[in-house]
């Protein structure tokens, strides 16, 4: 936008009419902009962007779809395309987003697949499966993260929340390890959702993952 340049030139003594003529627009257009330097849409985008930045800072794992859900839940009638545009323009990407279309080869997996599609266990607490499911209620969405023991088929830990966050997964994991010997346990996420960042975790990774969030003050 060239209008601010006219303001700078006017401060140096250059007439507004001269600057507008040289830059190729009318003085009426300049004074209209001077009266309202931003449009209503730009003003609304600025407010939405502030909320998006705060939401992304709270949960950097969120992509624009989850951020859109959060805005809708807060009462904003905003489209997913608009949220995607604001996120793209301001580089609010999920920390687990992958670059596409750059001709690059995929890198190694975040963590080894320790299960290798062999979903059997000889004893309890050898292999746990985890997933996050979404449920609709009269009061809105409810998310449940659960850990299931492969041998017994029992749910060994779960957590409920109104947002799909990493904190939800950590709370469920903390509930699962209470009173159990998980030194030989493998935790496998069947679909590797963004809130559970690693496909398979061994015992040391379970401890490290839970402690990392506890140190940040986000584990409950």
Image: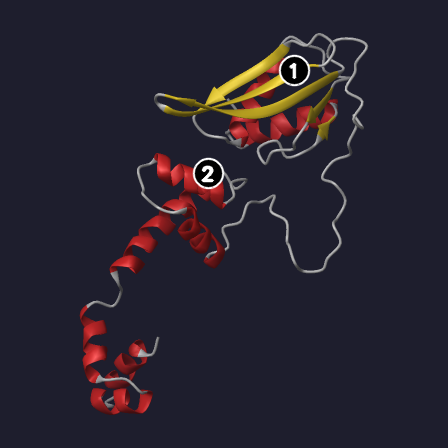
In x, y percent, where is residue 201? 72, 27
Q: How crowded is mark 2: few (under 14 residues within 10 Å), some or many (20 or more)?
A: few
At x 50%, y 30%, the residue is 164
Q: Quadrant of the N terminus?
A: bottom left
Q: Which of 21 and 191 is in front in this view?
A: 191
First in sequence: mark 1 or mark 2? 2
At x 62%, y 11%, the residue is 156
State yes or no: discs 1 and 2 in contact (Cβ < 8 Å). Answer: no
The label number, if any, that marks residue 148 in the structure image: 1
At x 37%, y 45%, the residue is 51
- Quadrant of residue 193 within the rendered picture: top right
Q: Is mark 1 on a helix, strand or loop?
A: strand
Side (left or right) of 12 relative to 181:
left
The label number, if any, that marks residue 184 in the structure image: none
Q: Residues within 10 Å of mark 1 (few under 14, many from 20)?
A: many
Count of numbered badges drawn on the protein: 2
Determine the CA span between mark 1 and mark 2.
28 Å
Question: Mark 1 or mark 2, which is nearer to you?
Answer: 1
Q: Name the residue under label 2.
A: 58
Q: Nearer the viewer, residue 114 or 134?
A: 134
Side (left or right) of 8 relative to 167:
left
- Compared to residue 219, the image places residue 105 above or below, namely below
- Compared to residue 132, the image places residue 59 above or below, namely below
At x 48%, y 42%, the residue is 65
- Compared to residue 17, the image places residue 183 above or below, namely above
In x, y percent, where is residue 113? 77, 31
Q: Is residue 135 visible?
A: yes
Side (left or right) of 103 relative to 175:
right
Q: Is mark 2 on a helix, strand or loop?
A: helix
Which colour scheme appears in the figure?
secondary structure
Q: Which of 112 and 54 is in front in this view?
A: 112
In x, y percent, where is residue 153? 68, 10
């Amino acid at each position: 936008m060239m209008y601010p340049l006219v303001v700078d030139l006017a401060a140096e003594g250059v007439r507004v009419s001269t600057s507008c003529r040289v830059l190729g627009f009318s003085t009426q257009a300049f004074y209209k902009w001077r009266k309202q330097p931003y449009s209503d849409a730009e003003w609304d985008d600025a407010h939405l962007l502030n909320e998006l930045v705060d939401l992304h800072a709270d949960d950097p794992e969120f992509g624009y779809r989850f951020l859109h859900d959060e805005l809708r839940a807060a009462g904003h009638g905003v489209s997913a395309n608009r949220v995607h545009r604001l996120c793209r323009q301001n580089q609010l990407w999920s920390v687990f987003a992958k670059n596409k279309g750059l001709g690059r080869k995929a890198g190694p997996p975040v963590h080894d697949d320790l299960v290798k599609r062999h979903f059997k266990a000889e004893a309890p607490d050898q292999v746990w499966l985890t997933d996050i499911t979404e449920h609709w209620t009269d009061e809105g969405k409810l998310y449940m993260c659960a850990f299931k023991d492969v041998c017994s088929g029992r749910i060994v830990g779960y957590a409920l929340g109104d947002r799909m966050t990493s904190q939800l997964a950590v709370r469920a994991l903390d509930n699962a390890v209470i009173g159990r010997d998980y030194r030989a346990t493998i935790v496998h996420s069947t679909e590797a959702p963004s809130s559970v960042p690693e496909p398979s975790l061994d015992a040391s990774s379970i401890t490290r993952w839970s402690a990392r969030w506890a140190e940040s003050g986000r584990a409950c």
